[in-house]
Amino acid sequence: MKKTLLLNPPCFDQFDGGAGSRYQARREVRSFWYPTWLCYTAGLIPGSKVVDAPAQGLQIDEVVSLAGDYELVVMYTNTPTLSIDRETAKKIKAVNPESVICFVGPHVTIQPEDALREDRIVDIVARGEFDITVKELAEGKALQEVKGISYLNGSGVVHNADRGFTTDLDSLPFVTEIYERDLNYKDYEIPYLRYPYLSIYSGRGCPSQCIYCLWPQTMMGHQYRVRSVDNVIRELMYCKERFPEVKEIFFDDDTFTANRKRVQEFSRKVKDLGITWSATSRANLDRETLQQMKEGGLRLLVVGYESGNDEILKNVKKGITIDQAKRFTGECKSLGIQIHGTFMLGLPGENRSSMEDTIRFAIEMDPDTMQVSIASPYPGTEFYDYCEKNGYLKTGTMLSSSGHQLCNIEYPDLPAEEIILWTEKFYKKFYFRPRIILRIVKKMLQDPVERKRRLREGRQFFKTMRSRRKYTKKSC
C-alpha cells in the first residue's frame, strides 16, 4: 500500500474550496465545510492522512514540506483554483520527484486534459466518484487496469473506462472516524449552523435536474443512492460518543428529503438519540414529513429558493413554483422549523426586474438567515453549456485577489459588475430591516457566544462588501 496523502491544498486566506464545498470561494463571513470526499477515500486506505490546508491555516511551504514523505498525493481541485493547485503540485514534485500526484474533483472529471499536460506535474486524474479509484491506485494496481482514471503515456492522454457509481454506501467507513483521526472539528464553522458542528452524508446524487448544480452533473449523478437508515443511526451514535461537544449534525446530501418515506423512517429512529440535526431540502415537502422531522430533532432546513421569479425557476429546471415555496415556508414556520434560504442572481433570463422579484420574495418568505450567491457556470453543467453557446461567459478569473467570488457571466443588458453590486443590495434590503436587526440583537444579548460570533461576522461582511465595490469600480 502506497503511503497516501489526501490534500485540500492551500489557497487564499479563509478560502472554502475543499472536497465538501459546492462552490469554491472565500465567503462573506468565515465558513469552512469538511473535506468529506477526501475523508471517505482516506478511510479506505490504511496509513493515509488528510490535510485540509485552508481550515488548518497551513501555508504552501508547510504543505510542500509535509508532502515530501508521501508516495501518492491526491489533491482536490476545481475550476477557480486549478492553476493555483497545479503550482502547488509543481512545488511538491520539486521536493519529491518520485511522488505520484493525482488530481480529483469536478473540473478535472469533465476536462482532465486541463490538468494533464506535457510538463507532467500531474500524473493522474481520478474522474467522478474517486473513493475506490484512489484506493486501487494506493494498492499499486497497474494504471491500465484502474477504471475511472486519465493519465499520460508516451502517445498522449489515456482515458480508461468510466467507473460506475458506488451503490453499496453502507460498505464505506464512517467519514467521522477520519474527522476524529486527522482533523480538528473546531476548525469548521458555518454561520447558520450551531458551533461546533459535524457534516455527514446519508446519500449521494440528486434526482433533480437543476441546470446549475455541480455535483449531480459532474461527480455523483442523478440517481439518489442512499445508506440504510440503521447505518446512518450507527454513525450518529458514534458521533455522540466521540464528539460530545458538537452542537449539531448537518446532513449535506444534495437533497436530503428526496426520499420522503426514508426521511420519515429516519425521523422516527433518530428521535431516541436526542440530538439536534439540520439538513437540506427542496421547498416542496409535505407537512406530515416536516412534522415527523421536527419531532425527530430537526432544527433547521437549508432551502434552495434560488429565485422569486417563476420564469427564472422554469429556465433552470428547478421543478418548484413560487406558490409551492410559499406553502412550504408557511408549514415550516408553523412547526417551528428554522430556514436558511439560499438565492442566486444571474441565472438564465435574469434582468433587473427579476432580481427585484427575488429580493421581494426573500423578504416575504423571511427565512431566519439567508445567503445570496452569484450564479457561476461550471464546466460539465447545462448552465455552462448554455452560457458558452450564447456567448455569455466572461473571460477572466472567477475569484478576486482575496479569493471572493466574482461574476463570470455577462448578459446583453446586464453587465457582470452590476450583478455583483446587486448581491450587496440584496443583503442590505434583507438584513437592514428593523425587525431583522432586532432579532439579531436579541440573540446577541441572550448569548455571549452568539454575540462574539455575530460581531466578528459583521466586520467580515462589511469588509467583503467594500472589497467588491472596489473591484466593480475598477472594472467599470
Image (tube, rainbow, N blue to C red):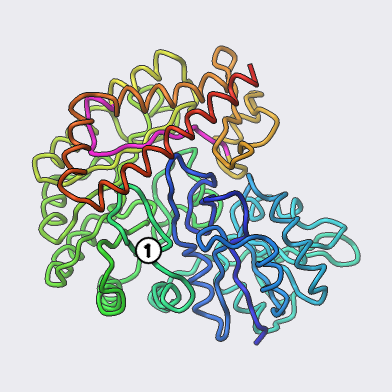
Is 81 magenta? The answer is no
Percent position of residue 254, x then y: 39, 52
Query: In the displayed structure, does residue 392 sit left or right of residue 87?
Result: left
Percent position of residue 361, x then y: 28, 24
Q: Vertically, is 314 above or below 93?
A: above
Query: In the displayed structure, does residue 49 sit left or right of residue 452?
Result: right
The answer to whether one can see residue 127 in this image is: no
SS for callout 1: loop
Percent position of residue 130, x then y: 58, 67
The answer to whether one can see residue 224 in this image is: yes
Q: Vertically, is 68 above or below 102?
A: below
**Quarter of the image containing the N terminus?**
bottom right
**Residue 61 found in image quarter:** bottom right
**Label 1 CA crowd tier, 10 Å (few <14, some 14–19, many 20+):** some
Residue found at x 46% / y 71%: 183
Q: Which residue is mark 1?
A: 201
In this rendering, the count of numbered labels is: 1
Query: In the displayed structure, does residue 302 sit left or right of residue 90?
Result: left
Q: Amino acid at mark 1?
A: Tyr
Front residue of 126 and 58: 58
**Quarter of the image containing the C terminus?**
top right
Give the residue at the far right of this rendering. 154
Front residue of 134 and 427: 427
- Report the span colored magenta: 362-377
Residue found at x 21% / y 43%: 444
Query: In the displayed structure, does residue 101 sit left or right of residue 148?
Result: right
Percent position of residue 287, x then y: 12, 45
Residue found at x 62% / y 52%: 11
Is 373 magenta? The answer is yes
